[in-house]
Amino acid sequence: QVHLVESGGGLVQAGGSLRLSCAASGRTFSGYSMGWFRQAPGKAREFAAHISWNGARTYYADSMKGRFTISRDNAKNTVYLQMNSLKPEDTAVYYCAATGRAYYSSSDYVDQNKYDYWGQGTQVTVSS
């Protein structure tokens, strides 16, 4: 069992930045690949970013490439999502998720059903 807790959300103006954190407890964090997803009001939850267990591979949704950076610190059992140049359309609840499997195909790491554990989410609101 892995317990995930997100933090770092808040209200920011368009063009600003936020860094989300996801702290993990339970089983060995380094054994898990991690993902960030988001859900905007009235919309389905969507993939944002994914990082392999050792940080060697990262993947992003097209709309977030160049603006968002996923990273992890296995010594601190934490994964991060640095979000820059935020837009009002980035407003959503952001969730981190963990999977015990290694994914290399976009059909896998973007699929929320491929993840085993989820946090409760943190709200990000971007004002125009």
Image: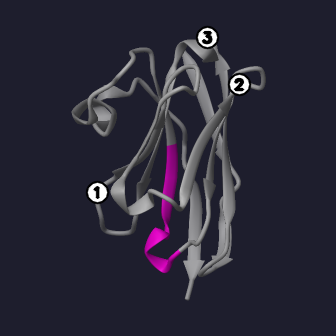
**Relative to 127, 41 lies left or right:** left
What is the number of the mark on residue 27?
3
For the view shown, which residue lies furthest in the right direction? 76
Please state the horizontal and vertical placement of residue 44, each as a whole percent of the image: 28, 57
The residue labelled by disc 2 is 77
How far apart, in angstroms, are the residues tagged by discs 3 and 1? 29 Å
Could you classify mark 2 by the number of other residues whose Cα lies within 10 Å: few (under 14), some (14-19), or many (20 or more)? some
Question: Which of labels 2 and 3 is toward the front?
Answer: 2
Q: Earlier in the sequence, mark 2 or mark 3?
A: 3
Q: Is residue 49 above or below residue 78?
A: below
Please state the horizontal and vertical placement of residue 33, each as a whole percent of the image: 49, 24
How far apart, in angstroms, are the residues tagged by discs 2 and 1? 28 Å
| Helix, strand or loop for disc 3 | loop
Amino acid type, mark 1: Ala
Amino acid type, mark 3: Arg
**Residue at position x 49%, y 79% in the image:** 88
The residue stretch that appears in magenta: 87-95
How far apart, in angstroms, are the residues tagged by discs 2 and 3? 10 Å
Please state the horizontal and vertical placement of residue 35, each as a whole percent of the image: 47, 37
What is the number of the mark on residue 44?
1
**Residue at position x 57%, y 27% in the image:** 55
| Helix, strand or loop for disc 2 | loop
Amino acid type, mark 2: Asn
Q: Earlier in the sequence, mark 3 or mark 1?
A: 3
